[in-house]
Image (spheres, coloured by chain):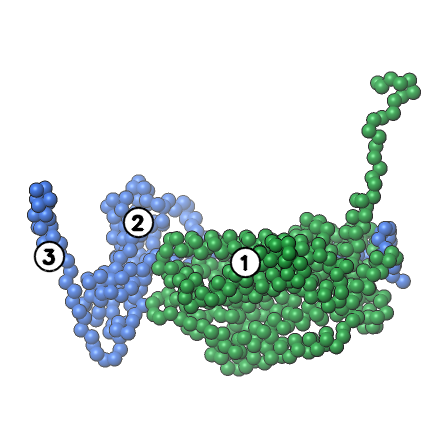
Chain colours: A green, B blue
Amino acid sequence: MPRDAVELRAAAVQPMVAAGRRFWLLAGLLVLGVVAGAAAFAYQVANGLAVTGLNDDVFWGIYTASLVTFIGFSYGGALVSAVLRLTHASWRGPVSRIAEATALATILVGALFPIIHLGRPDRFWLMLVRPNIQSPIFWDMVAILTYLAATIILFSLPLIPDAAAVRDDPRLGRRRRRALGLLSFGWAGTRDQQRTLERALTVLAILIVPLAVVVHTVLSYAFSLTSRPGWHSTIFGPYFVIGAIYSGVAVVIVAALAYRRVYHLERWIDDRSIRNLAYVLVALGVAYAYSTFSELTTEGFVSEQADVDLLFGLMLARYAPLFWTFVAAGIVLPIIIVALPRTRTPPGIGLAAGLVIVAMFIKRFLIVVPPQTRPVVGGELGAYVPSLVELTVVLGAAAGIVLIVMMLFRLVPVLSIDEMETIEHERAAESRPAHRAPARLPLPADGVRR
Amino acid sequence: MNRIRMAIGAIPLMVGLVAIAPIEVAATHLGNGLPDPTTVSISFVPSANARISDRVSARLVAYDDTPVSQVEIEFRREAEFLGPRRVLLGRATTDAAGIAQIPIRPTESRLRIEARFAGDERYAPAEATVDVEVPPGAAVGQGRAFEPPRSGVGLGQIASVMPLLIAGATVGVWVVLAGLVLVTLLGISGRRGNRSPGKGGQEAPS
């Protein structure tokens, strides 16, 4: 086995074998967060939604904002992996496994939020046994479950050759080696096996792109198919989709930088991959800024009273601090940081991505809450402040996402070994001097070309 | 001089307008601590001129038949798109005669319109419905904005087709996903010969 291949395997299993005191301390804190979130949810189930800040006016709050945010994160991760695979981007190798893992962790947690939001979670069962097919919420559930299945497959199939690559590593312990052996499905790296896997991954990548678009569009329909000002908008489908990829790419960047730094993977998750992800982030940021501008301008220019009230609250009154924080941290600063060569460094890009994650959560809150504060049939402006219970549940969920990612990489390699080797193999084959046909055919013996 | 003549000419018109203007009569409240009962009546007012919109008019009166002014009436129409729903047409405030009206341009030959008063601290809620038949022949001839229904096919029927299409697509995706996993795993676990050269890769399983 070439030295590079040995070193790649060693680097890929680093998080699986090198969990120090700091790892377990962080994991312990995250478990505490998850337990606190679960306890807060149990308290909510026992006492009803009265313990939340939700009320007659604002019936969707931070839980719905979290649903949109977390599923958006997932979408971005899946698309980074799928689109880069379909376009044969040579820099995808080091980040594709991280993208797939963040996609899986965030959809697993995000999909829980519709249930968390129910005052009677047991009634979720009724969605399955007595579905209302006219309701966007029902199709939301179908779309999310389908996308969840596709994400699990997207994470699992590329693992097969990598599981085979590391299943004999003695540092992994007997149980993990046995599990990896099962997961490798007898992979021996034959041409047929490679062809079968490659074909399956291509089909899956093609399938997951429209699937992810559908999921987020259907999610946006939960808002835009109502006649409420601020929600009833034709741009909401693509607006949600762009926002989802934008925040999802930011999550992939932060996760990749974290693993790169903690496990010293700079040689593998190189600056080029991080920089290219940053370019994707900026392109999406510009698209999101354009969509936001288009959405607000069309509402403001027509100036129907309800829209004007909403825009006033958003830009100049109650929600102005949040709105301008979103504009600064979610659009302006990330674009500037990545645009300037001096700040386009891994720490700078990490900062930009972190800002995007926070700002996009704020943006989802602004999409969900302010339109509900203006009553549809008269009365005073409503108000909503998330309660401690809601905040604890959301923070517990966020802790759960980080914990799932950390635990996933205790079980499987953090780098996509097979994919990186394949890319390297292709690159080497391309750089080899090709056999060239002579420019002119040699003349026949008689010297006459016929 | 012309201006003076015009002003003098306008006097009878202004007097006439004042004469026909409704006089506001304040309702006498029952004073039992509860909102007074109200009644709303609704009518469709077709326009004789195709260039001018038809109107839907609602009149809100209190229990003693006095008009209730300065309250908002909401107009909705029954619609069918993926099943029956009530679509908001608009809102209008009642005038001194208790009348609120909005312009409407029917896009179907048959409409069911609802006027609803949501109620407030003084008056109880009320609602009424009117069925409107717009003669298609005359309407199309006058350049109205709808086409006559063809052989009983309407948007409402999408309600029965769309869920089937979506459900079919969903089942299709699940079948593809399941098939993909099955074929891939069978393909990988069943084919172990013919090792690939060049990638310093995996050992063959013992």
Picture quadrant where residue B66 is located: bottom left
Q: Which element type, helix, strand or loop, lies under badge 3?
A: helix
**What residue does disc 2 label?**
B134
Q: What residue is shown with label 1?
A: A331
In the picture, measured across the screen, residue A245 lies left or right of residue B146, that is right
C-alpha distance separating marks 3 and 1: 62 Å
Spot occupied by residue A446 in the image (x, y as percentages of width and height): 91, 17
Residue B55 left/right relative to B13 = right
Q: Residues within 10 Å of mark 2 (few under 14, many from 20)?
A: some
Distance (Cα) linking label 2 and label 3: 34 Å
Q: Determine which of the numbered discs, if any, sits on residue B19 in the image.
A: 3
Nearer to us of marks 3 and 1 is 1
Kind of residue at badge 3: Ala
Q: Which mark is residue B68?
A: none
User: Mark 1 near mark 2, Cβ–Cβ under 8 Å?
Assistant: no
A138 vs B124, left or right, is right
| Kind of element beneath mark 1 | helix
Residue type for callout 2: Val
In depth, the one of A183 and A91 nearer the eye is A91
Q: At numbered mark 2, what does the secondary structure look like: helix, strand or loop? A: loop
For the residue marked with disc 1, what is the amino acid? Ile
